[in-house]
Image (cartoon, rainbow, N blue to C red):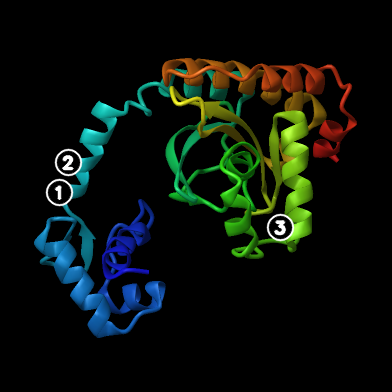
Amino acid sequence: MSSAAKTLGLLAYFSPTRPEIGLSQLCKLAGRDKATTYRHLQALEDTGFVEQNPATKQYRLGPAVLQLAQTREITVPRKAGAEHALSELAEATGETSHVSVLSGSTVYALASCESPQHSTRAIIDIQTFPLHATASGLCALAFGSADLMAYACKNIQIFTATTVQTPDALRTAVETVRQTGFAWSGGALEIEVQGLAAPVFDHTGLLAGSISVASVATRFTPELQETIQRNLIIASREITRNWGGTIPDSLEAKWASSLSNTNPQIMEFSK
């Protein structure tokens, strides 16, 4: 990994739940020595990507990040094109909806919407989604570049008892996604959460990301599963259209087959 990549990689450790990070903590998170980490932080601070809180002496994201985020949304309006579908999906399912985007080998969180129907909800508090352990990640593996599978197989991390643990198990899970048109993650990242996702496409005709529903596991019934699947299709079509893409005919056929219960694999999701 180049020095520039290592420097920019430090930005990924900041999140809404970890808005400020001290030098020592960042060293541990990144697995680097203090001198190297400090040098990288200085480069980021000089360019406005991070700044040091004068009160706590910890580092936080700087104004340059906001400027880039605004430019990105103006030139590639992903979030605006997904917000209505997210709201409708959360309302229809009573669960948390969220959309992610694929960039390189990483699936990034873009936006989420929590349903007010329940006091207990799934909270999307991560910035990136593991390819092998989330419905969003499985969508990327099933419908994205073939190179992603090799990367995912080399980076399998066990989060819960239901996380796939071998490359063969991951390939089997991804093949199910391809056959059904839906990705499912049954507590693979967090045991209390069940996730269902469908792919979204953009003007390039390629996978751009996924639209997902994260449900509290105790509420995930076969009836809710079907409701989520039907509304994921509606949301995927809308976001894909807003992003300038079209749903492949082959995927539409797989969705129709799954919802007509002609594909028995889809019923395994609720077991």
Side (left or right) of 86 relative to 148: left
Q: Residue at x 89, y 22 (%)?
A: 262
Q: Which image quadrant for residue 216?
A: top right
Element on which disc 1 rests: helix
Return the x and y of residue 76 as percentages of the image width and height.
31, 28
Three-letter residue code for mark 2? Gln
Measure the C-alpha gap from mark 3 to mark 1. Answer: 38 Å
> Dot 3: few (<14), some (14–19), or many (≥20) neighbours within 10 Å?
many
Label annotation for residue 163: 3
Quadrant position of the C terminus in the picture? top right
> Dot 2: few (<14), some (14–19), or many (≥20) neighbours within 10 Å?
few
Label annotation for residue 67: 2
Measure the C-alpha gap from mark 2 to mark 1. Answer: 6 Å
Element on which disc 2 rests: helix
Residue hosting label 1: 63
In front of the other: 37 or 56: 37
Side (left or right) of 28 relative to 207: left
Measure the C-alpha gap from mark 2 to mark 3. Answer: 37 Å
In front of the other: 44 or 58: 44
Three-letter residue code for mark 1? Pro
Q: Earlier in the sequence, mark 2 or mark 3?
A: 2
> Dot 1: few (<14), some (14–19), or many (≥20) neighbours within 10 Å?
some
